[in-house]
Amino acid sequence: MANRAALRACGCAYFGPERLRDDLKLPGYYPSRDAMRGQGAALRQVLGAESRAGRCVLLSDENILGSPRPPATMSGAQLYPKAAARLEAAFAALDLSGVRLALCIRNPLDWLVSGWGHQFLAGRPVGFEDFCSGIAPMALRWSEMAGRLLGLEAVSGVVLWRYEDYRALAPQLPTALVGLEPLPVQAMPEEGRARRYLTGPSARAITALPRIMAREPDLTAHAAMRKAMSRFPKGANWPGPQPFAAAQRAEAQQSYLEDWARLAELESVTCLTP
């Protein structure tokens, strides 16, 4: 978002969540293709105008593949089990072909814990075992999902990078994603409102939540969580929750690295980190 003007000057129109969840709604699930096509009319018109102007388009929203909670994000041994169907319907509604997908992936165990923490931020406190119900965390593989997406007729390729490498890769992304020359991109801020909002709760804040809600019953779960996070902010003093044992984390990290190697061998996949 910070680099939208610089990207546009170089021939790339960027549309992020602030547009795709508001006036230029990305088509979601509807019972009929006609309803999907109707919802995508405004975005389809904008995409046509940008194409006629000679600009490539970058659509960016972390929820394009599905909503941010299980079972949409994870079910059984699959990541985003309905991602292919969701994208196929959206591409048809928007008249898109030759689409290059760009995905920032993450160690599935770390991502699962992060997703659980964000349920508290959203005012939906839930136990970890309930959150993980129906999921086989140690069996999750990004390569399995990538194979499904590469099978879509409208997809020409997939660009991947690891969440853990994002800051180092940020200056390279304009070239990697849309073929632009390197830009003097602005880095993500270390502090500020966005970072405070996106940082999940500490383990201590999660355990403090029931007491705060019992003491102040008029507070919503969201407000009580914010109060707990203010009192016990995640950091060196108050680390984030970690429900997995050390041996499980070590096994998952090794599987994640092996899965990255499998991804790099897939045809039409570009991995931005070795």
Image (cartoon, rainbow, N blue to C red):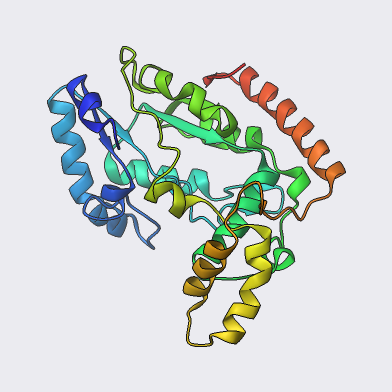
Task: Locate the C terminus by quadrant.
Answer: top right
Direction from residue 3 to residue 103 in the image, left or right = right
Q: Quadrant of residue 128?
A: bottom right
Q: Is residue 67 above or below residue 95?
A: below
State whether residue 71 appears in this view: no
Task: Locate the N terminus by quadrant.
Answer: top left
The answer to which of 155 and 181 lies nearer the viewer is 181
Direction from residue 99 to residue 51 in the image, left or right = left
Question: What residue is at 21 percent from the left and 36 percent from the top?
Answer: 47
Question: What residue is at 31 percent from the left and 15 percent from the top?
Answer: 180
Q: Is residue 150 above or below residue 140?
A: above
The answer to which of 177 and 6 lies nearer the viewer is 6
Rendering coords of residue 135 (x, y %): 71, 56
State whether residue 89 appears in this view: yes
Q: Quadrant of residue 95?
A: top left
Question: What residue is at 33 percent from the left and 54 percent from the top?
Answer: 33
> In the displayed image of the protein, which residue is found farthest to the right?
247
Rendering coords of residue 48 (x, y %): 17, 35
Direction from residue 245 to residue 45 in the image, left or right = left
